[in-house]
Image (cartoon, rainbow, N blue to C red):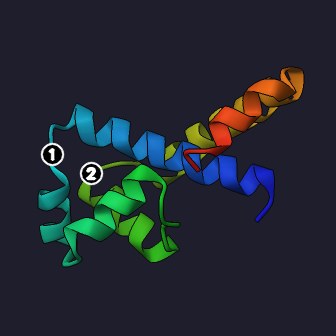
Amino acid sequence: MSQYGKQFEKALAAELRAEKARRNITEYDIAQQLGIHRVSVSRYFSGARSIPLATFADLCRTLDLDTLEIVSKAEVAAKKELKRQAADPSSSEGTQQGA
């Protein structure tokens, strides 16, 4: 996967985490609504696992989110992070450890 793809997935997970927190909903509640394991939800929200498109759509529906808006926010964040890394290559090593 490209650096952009990795950053985009990381940013998408961060956007979903933020929205989950704003709505004060637990990973357990989300898992119950989607009919999947809580561990899978945790991995999606932490960025440890890629989110399948259908699951992403279901997550957005569960959180009452506009899919295009979340994707757009993630795209902006990913591009911003890549620009920051390009400007300061020594800092990109630390950001890759959590990916």
Residue drawn 38% across the image and 53% down it: 45
Side of 95 relative to 44 (left or right): right
- Label 2: how many Cα within 10 Å (few below 14, some 14–19, many 20+): some
Dividing the picture into quarters, in which one does residue 74 lie?
top right
Question: Are discs 2 and 1 less than 8 Å apart at CB?
Answer: yes
- Return the disc, 2 or 1, that comes first in the chain's sequence: 1
Pair 2/1: label in front: 1
The kind of secondary structure element at disc 1 is: loop
Position of residue 6 measured from the top left corner of the image (x, y, whole percent): 68, 54
Amino acid type at circle 2 is Leu
Task: Identify the image quadrant of the N terminus.
Answer: bottom right
What residue did someone put label 2 on? Answer: 63
Looking at the image, is 74 positioned above or below residue 36?
above
**Mark 1 lies on residue:** 25
Q: Is residue 76 visible?
A: no
Residue 88 vs residue 68: left or right?
Answer: right
Q: Position of residue 49 (x, y in %)?
A: 48, 65
Q: Which of 63/42 is in front?
A: 42
Nearest to the observer: residue 72 or residue 29: 29
Residue type of the residue flagged with mark 1: Ile
Establish if 89 lies above or below 58.
above
Marks 2/1: CA–CA distance: 8 Å
The x, y position of residue 9, in whole percent, is 59, 54
| Label 2 SS | loop
